[in-house]
Each structure stands twice: as structure tokens, then as C-alpha cells.
Image (cartoon, rainbow, N blue to C red):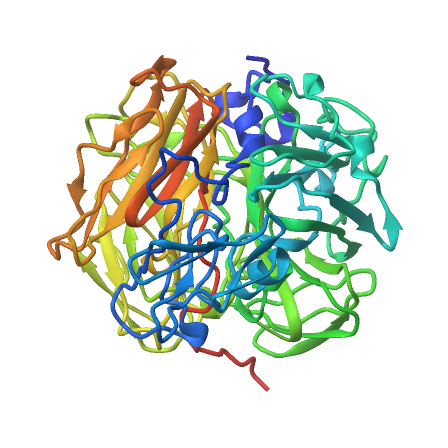
Amino acid sequence: MIRLPCPMRRASRWRAAGWCGSVTLGAVVLGLLAAGCAATGDDPGAATASTAGSGGTAGAGGAASAGAGSGAGGNGIEPGPDGLHCSADLRSIVDGDGVLVETCPPTEGCLDNECVPACQAAAASKGSVGCDFVIATPDFFGEDGVPGATSPCFAVFIANNWTSAVQIQVSRGGQALDPKVYGRVASDSADPATWPALPATGLAPNQVAVLLMSRDASTNYQCPTEPLAVDGSTAVTGTGRGEAFHVSTDLPVTTYDILPFGGATSFLPSAELVLPTTAWGTNYMLVVPPLGNSDFWEDAGPQWAQVVAAENDTTVIVAPTVALPGGPGIEPAPANAATTFTLDAGEFIQWDPAGEISGTVIAADKPVAATGGNAYLCLTSATSTSGGCDSAHQQIPPVTALGWLYAVSPYASRMSPAPESVPYRIMATVAGTTLSYDPPVPGAPLTLGAGEVADFEATTAFVVQSQGDTHPFYVGQMMTGCGLTGGSGLCTGDEEFVNVLPPTQYLSRYAFFTDPTYKTTSLVITRQKTKNGFEDVEIDCLGQVQFWQPIGESGEYEYATPYLLDNGKPKNGCANGPHRAWSKGPFGLTVWGTASYASYAYPAGGNAAAVNRVVIPPPK
């Protein structure tokens, strides 16, 4: 594994010697095949649909129903009066028992129990797969003047979730950018420079295209190969306006981004699942990762935020919890007051530094996306005193996609068999939100006001819920620095920030990709009890998942943290690379990879459709 010199202004005590942990392919691929590859004959969930209600009422669109590995939402797949409904992967029509009635043609999908163009079906599902994406270049601490760290290599990953080859189109600022020039098809090689070019025939089913988008010529974090979509920086420095990339496909795909990308020669990575524009909303309550432990690490942060539009003349009203700075083309936005901005298609606004902007209300007259990040996240806990620091960013779901009940499972402890103290960030959207925990979590908030954020730690799994779907809230999970008070002493894993999905967004099967350069790969699987009890969950190389543990005393949820590899030792012959998981019932799956001074995590897919009808208006 290759190590690179750290920018010393950002070096922690653990990196003061001038070396940083390497992050490679999996931090790049981050589930590139997550949520949506075609099932094969040994996958019993291929032609079934699951319903993942967690109690309470379904929100707009009847979205208590979970989609399948395609990331389909509830819209358009509900059973009709005759029991017919769309299969969970949107490719078939099935009866009330899940028996195949009709398979849609290769370029079509199921919507309202009929076969329609595939992109139309995916759009109506409001899921995490789609055919239209607008992607802003994330912020990075180099934009704040750190030499050699400005605008590192930015990459976008496209996973083909359908059964036919996918054609990809990319543009920026109205200029077409042919992806066959700079696109690569990911393989199991740890060297991205050896990956073959994206062919003219398109991206084959179950393959992942890596699009090398941009980088600054002076950055230390160059792309592993060239050419690039844009030979220069596409990032915004500080607060200002920028131009996003527009990615479109002729069949549904799953999309991720990562920055910096460099295979075995990158570190400080941050990645996110990118929602298609068809899953965007018009109402958000923004969340950013915490600033971190600035007492121990010099210059932690800054926290930053972005809002991007897909249509011209989009009016965005922002009511920040803290005063936001102005910049080129952006007026300052005072705290606790509404400020209006106008965005055109593909344009985004970035605030850096944004401060603790969590709880900020965003309302728009057309769909937008909102992202919160931290350019340099440094975290400690009751069981971690130090480590390295990493960038972090997450696309935040719309208010209507937030849950009111979460079954929260810890990742596999790096101090095993002792439990690790895991940090969480929770935010309420509605005043008077009361929270209950099963089992009780010392230090966790019991009541929260609208937009109020609380950080706490837990050493066990727990269920947290509010009064119901009239009080949705957000939960984020974090990994601390690798300087643990117990464990191997190898400084395994590092800072990470990831969305926790509610059970209403669980799927019945997933396809995912794990990084071949990480010595340890583990999964966090959370399953929900069905009318038939707890359904078995199977992993392609492991078989049936074992060693389930109850979450609380309700008997409704269980979790397991199986390893695929543990410090380089394969479990049951498993190896890093593409994998599948399936069940007859709904379950959540988060992938974790850890190595020296490095970690990545991502939910392997989810239902982004509306699960509540709450609207948070900005103050007048």
C-alpha cells in the first residue's frame, strides 16, 4: 500500500511524521454495484417484492413499500385491486404471491402494473436509481489555501443496474463531454490505470464505469490516468457559484462520486450516493458533519454546504441557522431569516465556511439537491483518543424521505470483543419531537426542537423513534480516528460519516462492491420481522448470515456484522469485489472497509420515496 506525504498544516499527531494512510479502489467504488444489479438464478429474491412498513402511516405516494436492489421506491409498485404489482426490481409484473406474470422487454420497466420505458419506471419509483443526475464537485480543504491540496481528482461512478448495455452522456455548462474519452470500466485490479476504456457499445450489465471528471493541475492528488472530462478545476473556492456536471443515461443506473480519487495513491477520501433528479425534493433541513475535535487537531473543518438545481429559474429560499458569508454572485444570508437565491439548470451555490449550518431550512419552487460536508473531519470518542482526519460529504434526503423510526446497528468493533463507542448525530425537523430508545442510551437526547442537533455516543444497537410520521428526524453514524484505547494497535479505520436509513427504506436484495485493497471488509445487516418471522438473509459467498443479535426488547429488529475478510483472512472463501445479498424480507445493509488510517462506508441502496407529508416552511 502506498503512502503519501500529508499537508503538514492538517497533520494530526498520528500523521506528524508526514505520512498519511492510503485509500484505494473501494473508497472509490463505494458500492458501485450497490442496489440494483440483475439477480441471477441463485437469488430467490429476484422476482419478489417486499413491504417494509415499520408501523405508522405511509406518506405521500404510499411509500411504506420498499423497493428492491434497484433502489426502487414505493411509487408505482403498489398492488392493484387484482393483486398484480410490479416486481421489486421493476422489471416484471407479478401476482399477489410474487409469481411471475409478465417480464418487461429489456428496455422497459414496470409502472402501475404495465411495462413502460425503463427510465420512466425508475423516475416514478423515486428510488436511488435513475437516468438523470446533476453532480456538483465537492469542496475540499485545499480550497482554503493548503498548498498542493487544491481541487484533487474528482470521479463519478456509474453502475449499470439493468439487463442491457447503457449509453452514458455527460455535459457541463452546455458543452458535451464524451465519456468514452475519459471513462474506464472498473475491474478487480487495484490499479485504475489498467482498467479498460468505456466502449462505444456502452456499459455492460453489472459493470461500473469510472468517469474521471476533473482536477487542478497543481494538486498533489492527481488522477491515476488521463485524459479527463475537464482538464482543470471544477471546484468552487470558498463561497460562490459553480457549474455542475449533467450525467444522463438511456437505462436506469446507480451513481456515486468520490473526491479525491486515485486508487492506491489517494487518501482523505469522501464519497456519496448521488440521488437522481427524479428523487430530489423541494424541502430540506440541511445536516453537516460536526466540526470535530479542533482542540486536538489544528484547523479542523471547515464545514460546508451546497445546493444545486436541475432547471432554469429555480427559486431557492434559504433560512440558515448561522449567518452565511457572501461571495461572487452570492449575497450574505443572515441567520434566522429567509434569503432568496435563483439558480439555473446545473448551477450550484456553495457556502464555505458554512459553520454549524445543520437545521437550516431550504425551500424551492423546483426540485433541488442539498449536500453537507466537512473538509477535514477529526473525531474522538470515549474509546478513541486520536487518529487521522478525513474529508466527508453526504447528499441529504428531502424532509419527506426522513423516517420517524430507525433501527441503528453499530459497525463491527475495532476493539473486539470489547464494544466500541460509536458517535451519532441526530436532528429533529419538527418542534416538540420526543424520542424514545430501546434500550435506553445514556446521554442521548429525549426531546429536540425544530432543527436542533444533538451528538451522542452508544456502545450498543438501539431503536429510536419519535411520536410518528408527523415528526421525522435524521440520524447519521460516524467512525472515529484509529487511535483506540483498546484493540490491535494497528490504527485501523479512520473518520467516516454516513447516513442511517430508516426501515421504511429497506430493500429485499442488494448488489455491492467491496474494495480489494482493504484488508478488512465487514457488513452491518439489520433485518425487520415480517408476518412470517425473521427471514433468512444470504450473502453470495457466506451463505446464510448467522449470529443475529436482538435490537432492544421489542423483538422487531435484529442485526449482524459478518466479515468477508478480517485482516486479510477470507471468511468462507470470500474475497473483495462484487457481491450480492438477498432475502424474502426487508433488511438494511451498510458496507464497511477498514485499513491502516483509512475507512469507507456506504448504505448499499435505499428507497428515497416520500414516507411522510411533513413540510418545513422557511421563516417569513
**Residue located farthest toward the bottom when viewing the structure as drawn:** 620
Q: Is residue 17 left or right of residue 316?
A: left
Rendered position, 123 above or below 588: below
Quadrant occupied by the C terminus: bottom right
| Along the viewing direction, whichever of 291 and 255 lies nearer the viewer | 255
Residue at the spot 45% in from the left edge and 38% down from the top edge: 511
Quadrant occupied by the N terminus: top right
| Residue 469 position in % (x across, y down) | 34, 73
Residue at the spot 50% in from the left edge and 48% down from the top edge: 291
Residue at the spot 67% in from the left edge and 54% down from the top edge: 133
| Residue 220 position in % (x across, y down) | 73, 25
- Is residue 230 visible to the viewer in this orientation of the structure? yes
- Is residue 409 visible to the viewer in this orientation of the structure? no
Rendered position, 395 above or below 295: below
| Along the viewing direction, whichever of 108 and 130 lies nearer the viewer | 108
Figure label count: 0
